[in-house]
Every structure is written in C-alpha cells, then in structure tokens.
Amino acid sequence: MSHEDFPTESPAVVTCGLPYANGDLHVGHLRTYVSGDILSRALATIGQQTAFVSGSDMHGTPIAVNADQEGVSPEEFALEWHETYEETFPKFDIEFDNYGNTHDETNTAITRDIVRTLDDRGYIYEKEIEVAWDPIDDQPLPDRYVVGTCPYCGETARGDECDEGCGRHLEPGEIEDPKSTLTGNPAEYRTREHKFFRVSDFQEYLQGFIDRLEGTSNAQNQPREWIEGDLQDWCITRDLDWGIDYPGDDEEADDLVLYVWVDAPIEYISSTKQYTERVGAEEYDWETVWRDGDSGGGEIVHVIGRDIIQHHTVFWPAMLHGADYAEPRAVMASGFVNLEGRAFSTSRNRAIWADDYLDTGFSTDLLRYYLSTAGSFERDVDFTWERFQERVNTELADDVGNFVYRALLFATRNYDGTPDADVSEEVEDAIRDAMAEFQDALNDYSLRRAGDAAIDLARFGNEYIQRNEPWKLTDEDPDQAARVIRDTVQLVKAIAVLLAPFTPEKAETVWSQLEEDGTIHDQHIEACLEAPPETFGEPTELFEKIEDETVDELNEQLAERVAEADAAAAEAAGDSTDGDDVETDTTDDDESKPMTELEPIADERISFEEFQELDIRVGEILAAEPIEGADKLVRLEVDIGVEERQVVAGIRQLHDVEALPGTRIVLLANLEKAELFGVESNGMILAAGEDADLLTTHDDAEPGTKIR
C-alpha cells in the first residue's frame, strides 16, 4: 500500500464486516453496508481503481443451534439467510463487486492454506485448556453460550468477551462461575487440547501497524490497550461440528473446527479472488492487493461496526503478516444506530427492518443519505422518523431538489437546454472547491464531509439564482441571463456527480434529465466541469417532501408492533414488563453486543441548597497516561486554577490519551477521594454517554471557574 492520498496507483479493495447468517437485516446493519458502498463509489469517482467485496458469515454456534431447532442442517439454514442478504442489498443499491460466503470452496481453501502456513512457521501451538461444558446436556459450551464473571473486573461477561465491563477478549476457560445460556445449568470445566495462535509474537509489529493505520479515531485508539499491554495468545479452535475443520494430520484436532473469527475475515481475500476470477486479472488482480510483495499490497479499507475493532486491528493483521499477506491501510468503525434514543431490540421487534423501510415506498436514496451523513462515522446515530423527515425535506428536497428543478426548468423554457455562454469564474471556483473538498473528505475517511460538498454546492446554487434573478435579466440583460443559467446548469451537473455515490438513483435521474450519454456511475470527478448537452427536455421534481401525516402513521405502526411484541414476551415470561430492560441484539455477527437505552429522568428532586454544595469547576488536562493493568483507566493531571489535581478517569478506550493534554473539561472537585488500581483519584471529570463525550464550556472559561 502507498499511504499516499487517494487516488493512488495501487488498486484498492473496500470490504464490509460480514453479516452473520442468522436473522433479518435492519437499518442499524445497513449503515455499514451503505457506507461501504458509498466509499467504494466515491473512490471510483476520483479515479481510484476499487473493488467492493463482502460475504455472509456462515459458521459458529448460534447457526448450529438455530438450525437444529428448525430441523435443518446448519449449511441449509445459513445458505437461506445468505440468499436473503444477496436479494436485499441490491434493493438499497448496495452493489458488491463480489459477495461470497465463508463456507464456499474458495474461502475454505484459502483459510486452510493460511492456517497451515502459520502452523508451519511455528505461530500455532497446542495447549490444554479448561472448556466450559454442560454436564446435564453433555455438550461443550463455546463462546457466548457461556455467561459468568469476568476474572479481571468482576462484571458479568460472555464466554469470549467482558462486554458489560472492561471489554477484554476472554479465552475459553477464563470466565468464572460459568453457566449455560442454553439451559441455565451450571457449567463445569473439562480439560481439552486446543490450538493457539501466537499473537504475542507480533506485538512489536502490531505497535508499528497501529501507528500506520488510517481510518476513524476509534479504530486507531481502542486497540492500543491490547497492543501496548500484555498481549495474549488467541485460541483459534472450538468444539463444534459446524465450521472449517482444523487442517493437518493432528488426530487430536480431528474433532475441532476453526473459530469463526479465523475464517470470517479471510472471506475478504476469498471474495476479492472470486471477483478476479470473474473479470480477469488484467482488469483487477487480487494478488496485487492482498499479497505482501515489493509494492506492499494494495489499499485495503475495512468498513465495520465498532464492536469488532479488536478483531480487525489485532488478530487479523497479525494473521496477515504471519502468512505474508498485506496489511490493511485503514479501518473505518461506525457507531451504532439507535431508535428514538433507545437501542434496537430485535427480540421485541423494536427496530426499523430493511423490509419495513422498503414497504414505506420511500426511495432508498433517502435512507442511504441519512445513514451516511447523519453524523461523524464513529458516532451513534439516533434514528427517528421525525429527524429523517427533517433532513430529507430540508437538505434533499429544499436544497438539492429545489435548485435542480428551478435551474433545469428555466434553462429548457428559455434556451431549450444549456445556453451558449461560458461558465463564470465565480461558479467554476465554487465547483472546483467542492471537488477538492469531496476528495479531501475521502482521504480523511469522512463520508459526512463528502456528502456536504454536494449539499453545500446546491445551497450555493440556490443563493446564486436568488442573487442574480435571471427571470429579470432575460429582458434587461439577455447575455447576462444566459451566463447565469449556463452557470446553474453546470452546477446541476456537478452536484449530480458528487451526490451520485450517496443517492445513485436520483443522481442517475438528473443525468437522464440532462440527456447525458451513458450512466453517471461511470463518470469521474472531472465531469463536474465538462459542458452539459446543448439541449434537453423539461425536468421532473427529484424529491417529494415527507408529510407529517406519513410520519405519524409510521410511528403508530412501530408503536403497535412493539406493543404486540412486548405483550407476547410478557405472556411467555408469565409476568408484565415495561420494555425498559437491556436487550441483546443477536442478529449481528458472532460478536453480538448488549444494547443500552437512555435512563429515565430520576423522580427524586434535590434542593437548590444541595446543588450549591457541589463544587464543579472548569479544568484543563495537563498530562495523561494509561494506568498499567487497567483497560479503561487513565491517570490525569488537571489544573483547576487554585491547584493541580490527580484524577483517574475511565476514558482510555474512547479517547486518544496522547491528545488529551490541553483539553478543557468540567470536574466535580468536592467528591470524596478514591483509590483505583492503586492510584488515588481526587475528583471526577464529567462526560456524557457511553462514548464519554467530555463536557466543556462554550467559551474559554479559565481553569478554576466555578460552574453554577
């Protein structure tokens, strides 16, 4: 890879985290796949050779268990979901160059080859471990079918991850007080031989890799706690019948399969190879991208959810490096999508499913635009129909649709198309600035900024029409009127090119209305300044506004569906429920995550006098360093004006520790002192939400200023 600005001479591949073949897709899942598609299209627009690949994750315990419950084979069960995804993605204009699955022959062969290579090079060894076992049902309990206590922080944890506490990856046998999530039976540990990958051998390499890695800040910072700490080796086999068999002649490993997180990312390679086999190496060569040759490989960009950062930035690059494959250039890790301030709950049908959205009749372009530009990629998106309506009506209908329709309608009625005039310097500069911003945004991995480049150009166009009033100039100054309308038609073409990755259907509509040749999706960014056709017909309006009545109907449908699911859950449980407990979304990939909801406002009030007793001050962080042995904790030195304080804060996974000095924060100064991991904490910094959004002041209040 080059690490040069896009476009580069090296081919790129954009991948998306594999959907787990175990359930329907909802808009939370679609955020990643839509964004990957947009990034791939946008890179192609600026001239970067790019392939967009993914596939279905077919292996693992949940699929085996659910298949058994339905009385079908795991392969049959997973293939049915795989085919569903293949049908669903194109409906949202998510166009993979290749979409495979982890159980196909290509992925099985490449996975076995990579594991053999790692084994031959001494990176894999055998070790006896304690495996959780349900003694009543007499079956092993891998991964998330065990629940117990984290040995590091004491919080409730799954068998492979402390998902409610310190966030550590847990190896089989580490969890304390294990229970079967299938039966509720207490589990016991039995000694079994398993295979381990020597991740610890790659610590120095990974420390360099994470410094080179591009992408979102969470992907660059979150893995440092593992890479810079005591890096543990990784158990890569499981006691299952469903998966890719461990390769080799080891009789002890005959009844073991590879852990799904071994073969799942290898599907990125396999899917790229399948693309090459279809189009030919002269058009796209998968080995140039993935093999770590003299060029160092191609531009590999992973677009994933933030719950699988560790797998893509620790285990995966170590595997690639150990087997002589190229390392990723960038990892873009998205936040989650919540619904009306609360987490999606698939068990309570509290979600906007992919089919639900299609049933609304809305263009899928609207959802693509909303999901990819609603905020910075690493932040959570709170989906509500009201917010969706607002952004569609203002940014797409008013800003883009209004300008395009007005400009083309005036051009056709007065000039039968593009007036015979030159583009003004002002408009050419505005288009060039938008093109530069679009390209800069891609190199910063910011889809929001890339989308804003097109929207801002439309806003400029609306302002330009209003300022120049061409309807008056047609009589007063015909030459100037022609120049203004020539400008607006050029702006329309540029907006369509820049917006095409986000709204492919509507951009193609504009291209057709301009009566341009070919398809807009074959155009490069230089087309923004190429002259439009001399003649074209009258346009139709691009976007219809979403009415309040429609939003009310959609909210009512969602509420009714959730109420029905809640009632069914209450009946099954034999008691009532208010629906406010924490849910686990099990339709994601094999690393499912607990989803939290906003806490209700406390009923109990405090007096003004009690509030005055809180000494809350503005502070400035002077120094910050991780606390050894603590995954989340950072020791801070904070200037609060009258003195400097040492404070311990649980923000290590969520902030770049080296970037914290100089940050203004808000600190509760009269909190009782505490000791955390042997370090005294004298105060508490205040932050919002699970992302630890540090509170600060609007202006530059001095350290020590009291907050009243």
Image (cartoon, rainbow, N blue to C red):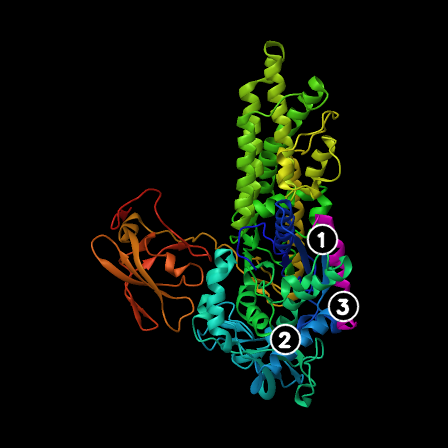
* Sequence-earlier tag: 1 or 2: 1
Which residue is disc 1 drawn over? 89
Quadrant of the rendered image containing residue 229: bottom left
Q: Which residues are magenta?
A: 70-96
* Sequence-earlier tag: 3 or 2: 3
Which kind of residue does numbered mark 1 sit on?
Answer: Phe
Return the residue nearer the eye: 427 or 146. 427
Q: CA distance from mark 1 to mark 3?
A: 19 Å
Which kind of residue does numbered mark 3 sit on?
Answer: Phe
Return the residue nearer the eye: 175 or 641. 641
Q: Residue at x 53, y 66 (%)?
A: 313
Please say whether residue 83 is one of the residues in the magenta stretch: yes
User: Mark 3: which secondary structure?
Assistant: helix
* Sequence-earlier tag: 1 or 3: 3
Please say whether residue 624 is one of the residues in the magenta stretch: no
User: Mark 2: which secondary structure?
Assistant: loop
Task: Say left or right for 447 vs 217.
Answer: right
